[in-house]
Amino acid sequence: MVKDNYKLPLKPSYLFKKQEHPKCGLKESIAHFIHLLNTSYFGECRFDESFGCSIWELDFDNLKSGTKLRTLIKASLESSLKKHEARLTRISVDVKIKQEEIEGAKSVNRIKKRIDLLIKGKIKKTNEDFSYIEYFYIGPLSY
């Protein structure tokens, strides 16, 4: 397998030491990019304010129903992926939201919303199926 994509996170120390930065394959590169898109908020990248997704905007929104949150996140991710991830085609996003109890410090448990993401598509270059699974807790966002 050809590895011509840089592995994330980028480590400038390799450049300073004049060493080659670690690389990864196409599927891993796409997965890294999707994670970066998921964890960026709109406007964070000054060169392209449309880069990111709405998870950050909904992070502390306790007023919207689970169905409304799911619809907003799904639409945002589909739109961002179609605009920014040119290596994939036939992109579909499935979002599930559930409440989960998380153990905190000193035996204090908290209830957080967990967002499960399943992103599927076809890799244009190889026509292979691609799937990506990730989950986040919101209020505040963590992964």
Image (cartoon, rainbow, N blue to C red):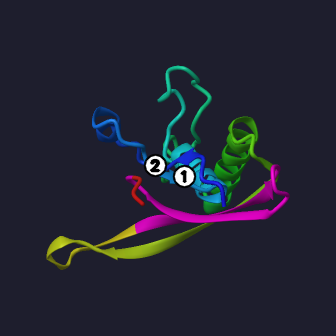
The residue indicated by pointer 1 is 32
Under mark 1, the amino acid is His
Residue, x 59% and y 41% (percent of image)? 53
Residue 132: horizontal and vertical position, in percent? 64, 63
Under mark 2, the amino acid is Leu
Q: Nearer the viewer, residue 106 or 6?
A: 6
Residue, x 52% and y 64% (percent of image)? 135
Secondary-structure class at tag 2: loop
The disc, 1 or 2, on the residue closer to the chain's N-terminal end is: 2
Magenta stretch: helix, strand or loop mostly: strand
- Count of numbered labels shown in the rendering: 2
Residue 55 appears in the picture as rendered? no
Residue 50, numbered circle: none
Residue 8, numbered circle: 2
Above/below status of 9 relative to 67: above
Q: Is residue 131 magenta?
A: yes
Q: In the image as oriented, which residue stretches furthest toward the top? A: 47
Residue 71: horizontal and vertical position, in percent? 70, 53
Instruction: Evaluate if marks 1 and 2 touch, with contact meaning CB atoms under 8 Å apart.
Output: yes
- Give the extent of the magenta segment: 112-140
Residue 6: horizontal and vertical position, in percent? 51, 45
Q: Is residue 132 magenta?
A: yes
Residue 65 location, quadrant: bottom right
Judged left or right of residue 112, residue 47 is right
Residue 87 appears in the picture as rendered? yes
Secondary-structure class at tag 1: helix
- Indicate the quadrant containing the C terminus: top left, top right, bottom left or bottom right: bottom left
Q: In the image as oriented, which residue stretches furthest toward the bottom? A: 107
Residue 24: horizontal and vertical position, in percent? 55, 55
- Indicate the quadrant containing the N terminus: top left, top right, bottom left or bottom right: bottom right
Q: Residues within 10 Å of mark 1 (few under 14, many from 20)?
A: some
